[in-house]
């Protein structure tokens, strides 16, 4: 058998004619940051740093900045406008998400969990049962939208992937806490399920993100902080603390994103107000609101289930609702709503929170 010449070998592996595709960036070096490595934001250089206002057609799943074959098929990504998903701090939030990962198996000192009075343990487990429901919603909703976002906004897709992992870990840690100390998983209200279903049914990213990242998780952060403060033992408190730290990043994305979106398109405010109104109308029409979580919070806040303890806990829970309301107003005004509209949206959401806790 005769050997092929070098020229024949090269001919058999001839590359396509790319003269009309454009030229790759050459000579660009992204330098690592001392002690941190290469940061995602620093990869926004050259062609990779050109973030389009509207995603280019025919780019497929290629990373932004790649030189793409003109024959690439259209993947049909529905969310192609930058203003619909972008946040100026998205790269840093992604880096924080990676650095903030923790392990629900090894980072909670499960062997130090003390035996609690029966009423406190039951209250903890009732709250855990409720939190798990919310964490599944917060995991499924961003996952529902991820494959609709054009990967030319890769930083957003990567960040939402970390949120899905965060929420999965929260569902895990709250399940483990409910089963770790003899209390067990508790009662699930149909009203809570209907509430969560109405949010999961959102099919518009802006509406869904606003209701979840700004209103929902903003309120959820306050709830986790309250629960951390009233937790009957340090192990349970740590589950709330670690979850709250993760939720802070999700809220930070929502605040930054909608500040950007409203600046780019002020008319979106009317759409977001309608989304809050429609969800509240649904919540008010549903029946059978759950007393389980509300009573459990009062028991923990008051330190027990005696009437005087319940009364003390009730006062603290009322104070929590007011703080939730004030924080929502602050966040809504920070992203571009006037004070009156912010108060109205917060009041609408607050009605739903009270109905379904």
Image: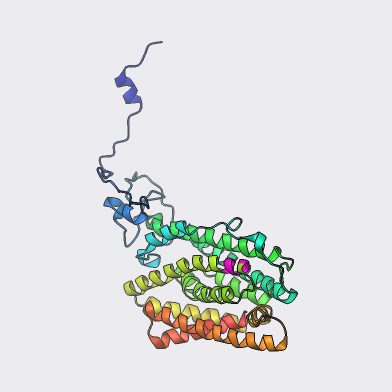
Which residue is more in the foreground, 226 or 41?
226
Q: Please give left or right for residue 9 compared with residue 185 in the image.
A: left
Residue at the spot 73% in from the left edge and 68% down from the top edge: 183
Q: Which quadrant of the figure has residue 341? A: bottom left
Residue at the spot 43% in from the left edge and 60% down from the top edge: 96
Q: Main secondary structure of the magenta part?
A: helix
Read off the magenta span.
Answer: 235-240
Residue 24 point in image, percent of width and height: 28, 44
Residue at the spot 45% in from the left edge and 86% down from the top edge: 343
Q: How is the image coloured?
A: rainbow
Residue at the spot 72% in from the left edge and 68% down from the top edge: 115
Residue 125 point in image, percent of width and height: 68, 70
Residue 199 point in image, percent of width and height: 55, 72
Task: Specify whether residue 234 is painted magenta.
Answer: no
Image quadrant where one finds the N terminus: top left
How many discs appear?
Answer: 0
Q: Please give left or right for residue 322 compared with residue 178 in the image.
A: left
Image quadrant where one finds the C terminus: bottom right
Whether residue 148 is visible here, answered yes or no, is: no
Whether residue 117 is visible here, answered yes or no, is: yes
Q: Which quadrant of the figure has residue 186? A: bottom right
Which residue is more in the foreground, 150 or 324?
324
Residue 59 point in image, percent of width and height: 37, 51
Which residue is more in the foreground, 34 or 56?
34
Q: Which quadrant of the figure has residue 2? A: top left
């Amino acid at each position: 058998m005769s050997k092929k010449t070098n020229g024949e070998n090269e001919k058999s592996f001839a590359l396509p004619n790319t003269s009309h595709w454009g030229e790759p960036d050459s000579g660009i070096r992204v330098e690592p940051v001392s002690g941190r490595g290469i940061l995602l934001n620093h990869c926004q250089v050259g062609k990779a740093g050109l973030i389009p206002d509207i995603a280019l057609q025919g780019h497929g799943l290629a990373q932004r900045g790649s030189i793409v074959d003109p024959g690439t098929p259209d993947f049909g990504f529905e969310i192609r406008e930058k203003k619909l998903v972008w946040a100026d701090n998205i790269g840093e939030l992604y880096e924080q998400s990676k650095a903030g990962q923790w392990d629900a198996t090894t980072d909670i000192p499960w062997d130090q969990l003390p035996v609690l009075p029966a009423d406190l343990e039951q209250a903890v487990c009732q709250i855990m049962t409720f939190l798990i429901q919310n964490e599944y919603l917060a995991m499924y909703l961003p996952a529902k939208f991820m494959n609709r976002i054009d990967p030319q906004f890769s930083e957003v897709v990567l960040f939402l992937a970390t949120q899905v992992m965060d929420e999965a870990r929260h569902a895990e840690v709250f399940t483990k806490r409910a089963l770790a100390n003899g209390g067990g998983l508790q009662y699930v209200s149909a009203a809570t399920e209907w509430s969560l279903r109405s949010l999961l049914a959102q099919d518009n990213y802006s509406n869904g993100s606003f209701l979840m990242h700004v209103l929902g998780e903003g309120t959820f952060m306050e709830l986790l902080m309250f629960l951390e403060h009233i937790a009957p033992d340090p192990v349970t408190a740590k589950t709330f603390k670690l979850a709250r730290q993760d939720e802070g990043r999700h809220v930070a994305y929502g605040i930054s994103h909608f500040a950007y979106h409203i600046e780019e398109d002020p008319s979106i405010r009317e759409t977001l107000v309608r989304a809050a109104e429609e969800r509240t109308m649904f919540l008010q029409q549903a029946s059978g609101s759950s007393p389980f979580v509300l009573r459990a919070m009062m028991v923990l806040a008051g330190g027990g289930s005696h009437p005087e303890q319940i009364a003390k806990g009730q006062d603290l829970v009322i104070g929590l609702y007011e703080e939730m309301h004030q924080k929502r107003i602050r966040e809504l005004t920070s992203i571009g709503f006037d004070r009156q509209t912010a108060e109205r949206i917060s009041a609408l959401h607050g009605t739903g929170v009270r109905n379904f806790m």
